[in-house]
Amino acid sequence: AAEVAAAARAAAVAEGREGAEGGDGGGGGGEVGGGDAAAALAEREALIDELRGREEEARRRESEAKRRALDKIGALGEESAVLREEAAELRRRLQEAEAVAAERGEVVAALEGRLEASDAASSPEVAALEAERAAAAQAARQAEEAARQAEKALAAERAEAKARNSALDAQLAAAAAHAAAAEAAAAARSERQDEAAAVAEEARVALEERVAALQEALAAEKGRAEEAASRAASEATRSAEASEAVDAFAAELDSAVARAEAAEAKADEAEAAALAAKE
């Protein structure tokens, strides 16, 4: 706008000079020529005034724009200061974080070194523990197999004991029958055989007592055998003590067999006594 106004002024001055020079050279060329020059000059002045107004408006707008720009620059300066402070705070935090990270990295490296050393030191112990666990598992499997075999043997011994008990019951029944026959024969005899009958009665009573004792012994043996079987079954679940339980059970089974044989011998003795009483 300033350049346009300056150009307009220069054009007006140049035209005014040319008009003045033309008036002087023409010797006063007439009132018509002078009036046109005045009208043109007035138009140029009006144009100059308009240009000045526009120039002032442009200057006002320029100053307003400068003021706004300065305000924005001030606001940006304040914002920049805040951003600088925030950036400084972020740099400080970043430095602290880097320091902490470095410290943690050292700690992690130390821990990794300790872990590697611990792994290297514990590898033989772990291998030994694995070997012990495998050996224990093998021993447990062997103990379970031994327990199963012992249970099978116990079942066979139990069946054999039942057969022996049945045989003993048959022998006891035969002995009782022989005693009854002997008692009948003694009662049929004469008065001279009263003493023999009394002896036979005593023998019968003694035989019944022995039979009752044998039956109690057999019942006790059956209970002990069942208890031993129960203990063997419970011991089968304990792998660590399975071998000892099997040995104890074998000892108890041998003892039970010995007691059964003793009971069988007692039954044989009772049968012999009954036969003697019959005689």
Image: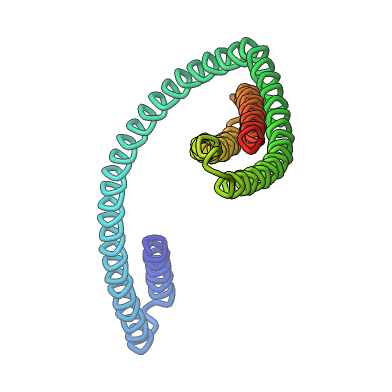
Q: How many marks?
A: 0
Is residue 9 or residue 148 the one in the foreground? 148
Report the residue at 52% width, 13% height from top. 110
Is residue 214 or residue 22 the one in the foreground? 214
Compared to 66, does 58 lie above or below? below
Q: Position of residue 276 (x, y in %)?
A: 65, 32
Is residue 227 or residue 22 the one in the foreground? 227
List the single residue furthest toward the bottom: 32
Is residue 207 or residue 134 the one in the foreground? 207
In the image, 279: left or right of 89? right
Report the residue at 59% width, 36% height from top. 225
Q: Quadrant of residue 233?
A: top right
Looking at the picture, the colour scheme in use is: rainbow
Compared to 106, does 173 lie above or below? below
Compared to 105, does 68 lie above or below? below
The quadrant of the image that shows the N terminus is bottom left
Q: Is residue 96 visible?
A: yes
Report the residue at 54% width, 38% height from top. 192
Report the residue at 25% width, 52% height from top. 71
Q: Quadrant of residue 56?
A: bottom left
Q: Is residue 227 visible?
A: no
The quadrant of the image that shows the C terminus is top right
Q: Position of residue 17 (x, y in %)?
A: 39, 67
Q: Position of residue 218 (x, y in %)?
A: 57, 38
In the image, 81: left or right of 181? left
